[in-house]
Image: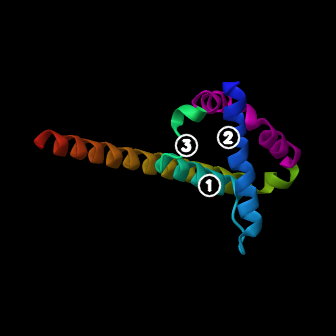
Amino acid sequence: MKIVTQVGIIFSICWISQIIEKLLPFSFPASVIGMILLFILLCVHILKVDHIREKSDFLLENMAFFFIPAGVSIINYFDVLKNWVVQLIVICVVSTVVTFAVTAYSMKLALYLMQKKKSGRAKE
């Protein structure tokens, strides 16, 4: 029953994000709205990590499976994309490097802030 509840929570957030997407006067992806909504719910402690832990772990462990349709689509449109191979490779390499750099500096900042918070508590 716990898994069913967790799936229900995740799908409810997805459904609400799709409703919000339809109500917005501008185009914004429902998946991003859902992530923001989930983040807010976790930050204000309306939702606890334990409420969705098992199902989210399952989804993260099987994430590669969800990219199969996108990979197949790329193969289906290879004749269209073959004229842009060099540009696509450059975009992939640059975006990967930027993503790694932003992630590394974000982690450095998070660790710095956590250390600062920990040392501030130790002084009290």
Q: Residue at x 22, y 40 (%)?
A: 118
Query: Disc 1 or disc 3, which is closer to the eye?
Result: 3
Q: Which mark is residue 36?
A: none
Using the numbered discs, state the Cα–Cα distance from disc 1 to disc 3 in whole angstroms: 37 Å
Going from the N terminus, do you reach mark 2 or mark 1 first? 2
Residue 123 lies left or right of residue 68; in this view the side is left
Q: Which mark is residue 47?
A: 3
Going from the N terminus, do you reach mark 1 or mark 3 first? 3
Looking at the rendered structure, the secondary structure element under dot 2 is: helix
Q: Is residue 32 above or below residue 103?
A: below
* Image quarter hosting the C terminus: top left
For label 1, the crowd category at 10 Å Cα-Cα, with few meaning under 14, some 14 to 19 and many 20 or more, is few
For label 3, the crowd category at 10 Å Cα-Cα, with few meaning under 14, some 14 to 19 and many 20 or more, is some
Q: Main structural element of the magenta stretch: helix, strand or loop? A: helix
**Residue wearing tag 1:** 91
- Residue 83 shows in this picture: yes
Q: Position of residue 59 (x, y in %)?
A: 66, 32
Please tell me which residue lies in front, 25 or 6.
6
**Residue wearing tag 2:** 9
